Amino acid sequence: MEKRTLGQQGLEVGAIGLGTMGMTMAYGSSDDAQSVATLRRAHELGVTLFDTAELYGMGTGANEQLLGAALRDVRDEVVLATKFGFDMSDPTFAGRDSRPDHIREVVENSLRYLQTDHIDVLYQHRVDPDVPIEDVAGTVRELIDAGKVRYFGLSEAGPDVIRRAHAVQPVSVLQTEYSIFEREVETDVLPVLRELGIGFVPYSPLGRGFLTGDVKPASEYPADDMRSWDARWQGENYDANVTAIGQLKELAAGKGISVTQLALAWLLAQGDDIVPIPGTRSPKRLAENVGAAGVTLTAADLDRVREILPHGSYGSRYPASMMPSW
């Protein structure tokens, strides 16, 4: 797989990574054996960036432990990224905790769960309004100096926070939702990243599955699946998005690829400083995702995508109470 360099600090990874949240939360029941098979197959196919977080195990370490066990034998060949920043005692996910002592505690837990002596990329998962970003960046700098962390990342941070953090400890990567469906970052965030030389890792690059074309209305998902309350799966939004997916499928079919591959190739075409991390629990889906790295889209293809969805999807990606505050 093509390699890309994220940030000026030299973080090199495969052009498509793997997000692992769905292996332990958010999309209904999961199968650890299948998840392990997917993780190992990803490595075989050239995926090097594997993305996890404290949150994905609800504070139990389950997601990180899954990665640690599955990738232990190839640890030196992969890049492990994890995150801190949530107050895991708050069941609403609204609480934040980026106090320096808490960051250090989470990192020690993550090192143990991942069965490693260093974390390749350590992200602040969400900005904590009660802790200055300078304190956060300084704490991560100490962890980098101690050899416990290699690169500093931010997630869902806005331009001001990015600049202030970068002034204390160079930020290598920013992670935020970005896809054909969700393009808010194009206006204010991407220009700042490129000015400062920071790489970009889009999460949910397939619109939480909508851009796979395998969708059904919100009411048909179980309560523990976030698509059951996502506005993009509701009523008129759902109908409009289904229509758009139909048009994207026609474009993809004309190129002999799937709509999933079209969506990922579209992201890769937005710049060589971008590495999407589609999530899947299926080795078959994984192979399809990885295949997008070999797809070339023409200028006409890119124009057609923006004609179909000029401003992204119909419906917000999060309820107002969960939207990141920049």
Image (spheres, rainbow, N blue to C red):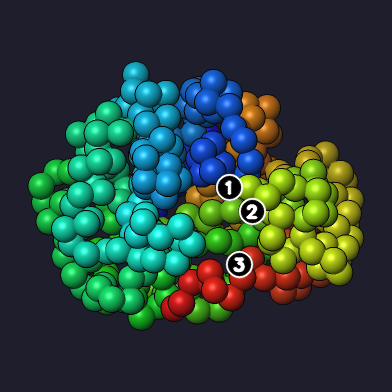
Q: Nearer the viewer, residue 183 or 123?
A: 123
Residue 124 in sight in this render: no
Under mark 1, the amino acid is Ala
| Numbered mark located on residue 155 in the image | none
| Numbered mark located on residue 318 in the image | 3
Q: Percent x, y for residue 285?
A: 67, 33
Name the residue at 71% across, 55% down: 228
Secondary structure beneath label 2? helix
Secondary structure beneath label 3? loop
Q: Are marks 2 and 1 in contact (CB under 8 Å)?
A: yes
Q: Percent x, y for residue 69?
A: 37, 24
Q: Quadrant of the C terminus?
A: bottom left
Is residue 239 placed above or below 15 in the rendered structure?
below
Q: Nearer the viewer, residue 7 or 72?
A: 72
Name the residue at 56% across, 78% down: 187
Q: Nearer the viewer, residue 168 or 262?
A: 168
Q: Percent x, y for residue 72?
A: 34, 23
Residue 271, located in which quarter of the rendered image?
A: bottom right
Is residue 70 placed above or below 242 in the rendered structure?
above
Badge 3 or badge 1: first in the primary sequence: 1
Quick check: 79 left or right of 283? left
State the separation of the CA atoms marked 2 and 1: 6 Å
Name the residue at 63% across, 59% down: 179
Quick check: 58 left or right of 309? left
Badge 2 or badge 3: first in the primary sequence: 2
Residue located beneath label 2 in the image: 226
Mark 3, Cα crowd under 10 Å, few <14 / some 14-19 / many 20+, is some
Mark 1, Cα crowd under 10 Å, few <14 / some 14-19 / many 20+, is some
| Numbered mark located on residue 26 in the image | 1
State the separation of the CA atoms marked 2 and 3: 10 Å
Under mark 2, the amino acid is Met
